[in-house]
Image (cartoon, grey):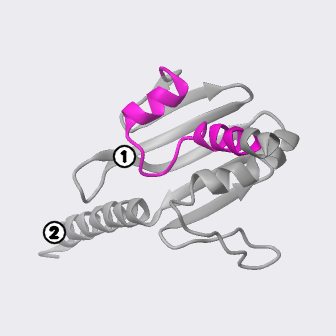
């Protein structure tokens, strides 16, 4: 019984060490401390052999949260060791399902991208993907409008 409780506490502590989709910058700072790199929307944190790149955006609720998070591991072995914990940390209470032998797991509300070449794992929330898609569509519409105005009168 004592070993079971110790194991459960260890699992909870391990899984809570990972930043998650939907977390605020304050929550990520609490986990990792100050970022080692800051840009307009992205904060990069460093923890042991992992670099954590969190991209923030304003969600529909009006809160600035992590919409995309990328974990960069120093080695493939570290990636393999941390993979299951990353899935758990970014599950938001849902189960990841295997889409096929050559496809990454999926769940409602998020996309997972894995790059073994880069030793990285990237999680993108559906809401953030829609945000990115809208920006791209708006940019394309603006360019089309510019091109249309430039060709008027010829």
Left or right, 18 with reference to 134: right
Q: How many marks?
A: 2
Splitting the image into 4 quarters, where does residue 73 fall?
A: top right
Instruction: Name the residue nearer the viewer: 108 or 128.
Output: 108
Residue that lies at the very extreme toward the front in this rendered image:
1
Splitting the image into 4 quarters, where does residue 10 fall?
A: top right
Q: Is residue 35 magenta?
A: no
Q: Position of residue 135 (x, y in %)?
A: 32, 60
Left or right, 142 with reference to 153: right
Left or right, 123 with reference to 114: left
Instruction: Name the residue nearer the viewer: 97 or 57.
Output: 97
Say above or below: 67 vs 53.
Answer: below
Residue to which mark 1 is pinned = 65
Residue to which mark 2 is pinned = 149
| Inter-mark Cα distance, 1 to 2 | 38 Å
Say above or below: 152 vs 91.
Answer: below
Q: Residue at x 25, y 60 (%)?
A: 60
Say above or below: 134 vs 82.
Answer: below
Q: Position of residue 59 (x, y in %)?
A: 30, 55
Which of disc 2 and disc 1 is earlier in sequence? Answer: 1
Quadrant (top left, top right, bottom left, bottom right) of the C terminus: bottom left
Left or right, 77 with reference to 9: right
Q: Which residues fall within the magenta stretch? A: 7-34
Q: Residue at x 48, y 51 (%)?
A: 21
Instruction: Mark 1: give few (<14), some (14-19) or many (20+) Cα within 10 Å.
Output: many
Prevalent SS, magenta region = helix
Element type where label 2 sits in the image = helix
Asked if residue 151 shows in the view, the reply is: yes
Name the mark nearer the viewer: 1 or 2.
Answer: 1
């Amino acid at each position: 019984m004592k070993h079971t409780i110790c194991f459960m506490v260890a699992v909870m502590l391990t899984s809570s060490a990972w930043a998650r989709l939907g977390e605020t910058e304050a929550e990520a700072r609490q986990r990792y401390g100050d970022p080692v790199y800051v840009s307009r929307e992205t904060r990069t944190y460093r923890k042991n052999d992992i670099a954590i790149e969190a991209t923030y955006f304003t969600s529909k609720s009006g809160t600035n949260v992590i919409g995309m998070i990328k974990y960069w591991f120093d080695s493939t072995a570290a990636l393999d060791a941390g993979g299951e914990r990353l899935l758990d940390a970014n599950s938001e209470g849902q189960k990841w399902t295997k889409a096929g032998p050559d496809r990454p797991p999926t769940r409602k509300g998020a996309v997972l991208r894995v790059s073994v070449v880069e030793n990285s794992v990237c999680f993108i929330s559906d809401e953030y993907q829609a945000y990115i898609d809208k920006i791209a569509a708006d940019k394309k519409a603006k360019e089309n409008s510019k091109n249309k105005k430039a060709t008027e009168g010829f």
